[in-house]
């Protein structure tokens, strides 16, 4: 069983903690708000009310043996950064921190944070992409300028073979048909109207595909 420490139990932190707990992981939930900690007792092995900026307190929690710690402490850069610094100093092997800006990310990287996330920015980018790419149901950036998208078979592609994409820069990596997932389908596979296509490609090429679908 993997162990995770969630530092900060606001909306984001509590959501992560609940999901990990549901997946059968051991969760240590930490916050300075007593009410949040009481709520977290339902989805954690340990729910602890402490100040995460106090290094001695963090040392006493023995968090150095968790598989990862996730820090989500609101909008105060000083609080987030100090907690992150202390967690690295006490030996947390993998530290993930929710940043509040690009400059904040630079600071976090400089003190050794392993992974920095921007949930709001990701959500905004995902929404904008879904709105701009015709028919896209979901979107996941994987590398700079590259994404994975979930697309219901466009009407103009229905009953055609996979190679109707006519582009090696956008690949159909899987097709979900009813409850069956077909990985790396052959170019000769016939697309059905209710198929969900999982595509991977460069954003500019995904946009070209969206324009083609709209024009047809």
Image (cartoon, helix red, strand yellow):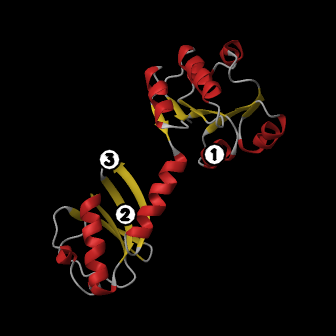
Q: Residue at x 44, y 26 (%)?
A: 109
Q: Which circle marks residue 149 in the picture? A: 2
Res 73 quadrant in image = top right
Count of numbered tags: 3
Q: Quadrant of residue 149?
A: bottom left
From the image, which quarter does the C terminus lie in? Answer: bottom left
Q: Which residue is mark 3?
A: 143
- Name the spot of residue 36 as percent of width and height, x first: 78, 40
- Circle 3 SS class: strand
Residue annotated with mark 1: 12
Above or below: residue 167 compared with residue 61 = below
Secondary structure found at label 1: helix
Q: Looking at the image, is 31 positioned above or below residue 184?
A: above
Q: Say if 32 sits above or below 85 in the image.
A: below
Residue 77 x %, y %: 60, 29
Does residue 141 appear to the left or right of 122 in the view shown? Answer: left
Judge the density around disc 2: few (<14), some (14-19), many (≥20) Cα neighbours within 10 Å. Answer: many
What residue is shown at x 75% (from left), y 41% (from top)?
40
How far, Cα to Cα, is label 2 from label 3? Answer: 13 Å
């Amino acid at each position: 069983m993997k162990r995770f420490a969630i530092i900060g139990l606001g909306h984001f932190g509590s959501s992560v903690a609940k999901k990990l707990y549901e997946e059968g992981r051991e969760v240590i939930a930490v916050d300075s708000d007593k009410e949040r900690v009481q709520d977290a007792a339902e989805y954690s092995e340990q729910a602890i009310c402490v100040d995460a900026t106090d290094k001695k307190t963090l040392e006493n929690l023995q968090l150095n043996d968790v598989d990862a710690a996730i820090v989500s402490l609101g909008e105060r850069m000083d609080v987030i950064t100090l907690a992150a610094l202390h967690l690295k100093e006490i030996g947390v092997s993998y530290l993930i921190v929710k940043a509040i800006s690009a400059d904040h990310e630079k600071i976090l990287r400089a003190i050794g944070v392993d992974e920095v996330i921007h949930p709001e920015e990701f959500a905004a980018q995902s929404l904008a992409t879904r709105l701009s790419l015709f028919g896209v149901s979901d979107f996941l950036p994987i590398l700079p300028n590259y994404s994975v998208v979930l697309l219901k078979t466009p009407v103009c592609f229905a009953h055609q073979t996979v190679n109707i994409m006519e582009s090696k820069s956008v690949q159909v990596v899987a097709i979900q048909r009813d409850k069956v997932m077909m990985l790396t389908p052959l170019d000769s596979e016939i697309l059905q109207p209710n198929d969900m296509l999982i595509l991977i490609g460069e954003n500019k090429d995904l946009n070209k595909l969206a324009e083609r679908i709209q024009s047809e």
